[in-house]
């Protein structure tokens, strides 16, 4: 059955949910088995070593760039229509939101996607932090925190279109984007095999994590091209998807239309749960004496507000938006790393556990 028949038989919304579920399950399983974590990668950099987590993260990021730029070169993806480039953006939102998100993920010991992965592994601290994160995201979108978020976004707005496209601004074009992507992948392979000379399975898992971003872009673009309805093309993003799941749980009458994000979160959880059960990693973990509840809750609030202000999380803005070389996405990714590094230094100076 081809895509057109699938859409006719099941409807656009259901096909989008299935696409999100497929991408989410693969991401959850691969991320769990490779221990993919942006926070841990930042911590290793701050400690002056390119260890396991940094090499896995960078290899996944390089694979993501190559996969997405290959889609662009083949004409299977039109980045100009995405939310990272087409609409009005915010430089101030990208920078300030990224800084807040980075600081928050140090406090919660994981970014949005990592909290979801850990929750499926039985970590109740991550589950609570993820719930607070989702509530804060919704409050920042259309609740009490929305006015503050809107005010900060208006400090430095940027027009949508070419002014948000780094490849257009630099004149590099799709070919230049692929060259940069291949260079990033080569650097990722260098760091990985310098740290793990013979761990080909782990390298494959990291590459799969990155390619799920490209898969999300490819599936939603294919559905958008065949559908008679307006379909948003997207990769992975866990901030808005988390808030959507929360709204569905609280009230089905006010929840948004079913789509890609509706299948993403549950399937990511299922994929991670399967990985934990197969690998023997599932274990219920609660708060201990050394776990500061205030740190986790504060970090979750900072991440939730920062994600909405910046337009995404480490995966949503940093990898998904960064893979199409959106200006604000790259500013967000850089700011997340800077915010996390600054938070790490404050932790060290205060003698807090990292």
Image (cartoon, rainbow, N blue to C red):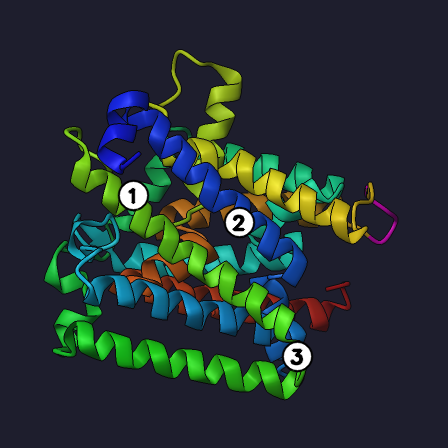
Report the magenta residues as a range. Answer: 286-290
Q: Residues within 10 Å of mark 3 (few under 14, many from 20)?
A: some
Foreground label between 3 and 1: 1
Q: Distance of mark 3 from mark 1, alpha carbons?
A: 35 Å
Q: Residues within 10 Å of mark 1 (few under 14, many from 20)?
A: many
According to the image, label 1 marks what residue? 220
Q: Quadrant of residue 294?
A: top right
According to the image, label 2 marks what residue? 26
Left or right: 214 in relation to 78: right
Q: Residue at x 64, y 66 (%)?
A: 40
Q: Which mark is residue 51?
A: 3
Q: Residue 266: x and y, percent?
A: 55, 34
Left or right: 153 in relation to 266: left
Labels 2 and 3: the sequence-earlier one: 2
Note whether 148 is above or below 213 in the view shown: above
Q: Is residue 43 visible?
A: no
Q: Residue at x 49, y 79 (%)?
A: 188
Foreground label between 2 and 3: 2
Q: Secondary structure at mark 2?
A: helix
């Amino acid at each position: 059955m081809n895509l057109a028949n699938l859409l006719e038989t099941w409807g656009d919304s259901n096909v989008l949910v299935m696409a999100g579920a497929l991408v989410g399950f693969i991401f959850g399983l691969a991320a769990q088995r490779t221990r993919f974590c942006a926070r841990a990668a930042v911590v290793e950099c701050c400690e002056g070593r390119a260890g396991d987590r940094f090499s896995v993260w960078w290899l996944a990021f390089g694979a993501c760039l190559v996969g997405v730029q290959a889609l662009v070169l083949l004409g299977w993806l039109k980045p100009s229509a995405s939310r990272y480039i087409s609409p009005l953006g915010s430089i101030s939102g990208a920078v300030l939101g990224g800084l807040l998100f980075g600081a928050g993920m140090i406090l919660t010991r994981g970014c949005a996607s990592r909290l979801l992965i850990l929750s499926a592994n039985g970590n109740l601290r991550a589950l609570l932090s993820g719930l607070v994160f989702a509530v804060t995201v919704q409050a920042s979108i259309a609740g009490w925190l929305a006015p503050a978020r809107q005010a900060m976004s208006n400090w430095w707005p940027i027009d949508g279109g070419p002014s948000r496209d780094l490849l257009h601004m630099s004149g590099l074009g799709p070919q230049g984007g692929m060259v940069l992507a291949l260079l990033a992948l080569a650097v990722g392979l260098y760091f990985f095999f310098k740290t793990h000379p013979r761990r080909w399975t782990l390298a494959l898992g990291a590459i799969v994590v990155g390619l799920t971003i490209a898969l999300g872009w490819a599936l939603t673009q294919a559905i958008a091209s065949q559908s008679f309805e307006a379909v948003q093309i997207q990769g992975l993003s866990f901030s808005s998807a988390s808030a959507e799941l929360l709204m569905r749980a609280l009230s089905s009458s006010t929840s948004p239309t079913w789509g890609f994000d509706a299948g993403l979160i549950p399937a990511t959880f299922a994929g991670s749960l399967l990985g934990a059960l197969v690998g023997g990693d599932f274990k219920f973990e609660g708060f201990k004496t050394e776990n500061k509840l205030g740190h986790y809750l504060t970090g979750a609030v900072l991440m939730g507000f920062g994600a909405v202000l910046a337009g995404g999380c480490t995966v949503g803005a940093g990898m998904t938006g960064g893979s199409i070389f959106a200006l604000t996405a790259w500013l967000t990714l850089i700011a997340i790393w800077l915010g996390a590094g600054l938070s790490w230094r404050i932790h060290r100076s205060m003698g807090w556990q990292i």
